[in-house]
Amino acid sequence: MSGFSGPVSDEMWTALRSEFGLPPLEQVQARLSGLADPEPILQSLARVFIDDGTFCPGFQFRPDGHLDARVTALFQTALKAKVPHNYFTLWIMTPIRILSGARPVDCLDETGLLVRFLPAAAAPARAGAR
């Protein structure tokens, strides 16, 4: 992730919204409100903070609407490494060399490798975060 500092570009948010969806947090909360205890799921959500609100990247949801455990494991690793939410999202959407130029989001079956790689790869983002 070297070279990532400052705000995430509008183009990245547009690409994420187009490919995976980027529902507002309020919409996700409403969808989960029918669960007996939605709070653990809400606390596990990766969220991005864009000028006009808080959003939940769609790559973390399976087609049935539940959270993808592989993304949740990566996000928990990011939280432990103190990676800001927006930079976690940028990292997962950016092609990286260790994956032969693939994006982590496209290689979720390699979650074990990604969990080991994320803290070091995201260190520049942590340093650049304000």
Image (cartoon, helix red, strand yellow):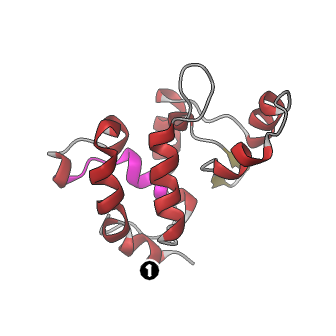
Figure label count: 1
Depth check: give the residue in front, 21 or 98. Answer: 98
- 126 relative to 69, above or below: below
Can I make out residue 108 in this image? yes
- Magenta stretch containing residue 49, yes or no? no
- Left or right: residue 76 versus residue 94 is right
Residue at the front extreme of this rendering: 36
Residue, x 32% and y 35% (percent of image)? 106
Residue holding disc 1: 127
**Considering depth in this image, is 35 or 31 the residue closer to the camera?**
35
Q: Which residue: 60% across, 19% down?
A: 64
Q: Is residue 13 above or below residue 118?
A: above
Mark 1 packing: few (<14 Cα in 10 Å), some, or many (20+)? Answer: few
Quadrant position of the N terminus in the picture: bottom left
Give residue 109's position: percent from left, percent from top.
31, 36
Q: Is residue 116 left or right of residue 26?
A: left
Residue for point 47% across, 57% down: 88
- Quadrant where the C terminus is found in the figure: bottom right
Horizontally, residue 73 falls left or right of residue 96, namely right
In the rendered structure, which segment of residues is drawn in magenta?
Answer: 88-97
Which secondary structure class fits the magenta region best? helix
| 93 in the magenta segment | yes
Q: Determine whether 40 is above or below 28 in the image.
A: below
Q: Residue at x 24, y 52 (%)?
A: 96
Residue type (three-letter) at the residue carrying disc 1: Ala
The image position of residue 46, as x and y in percent, is 60, 50
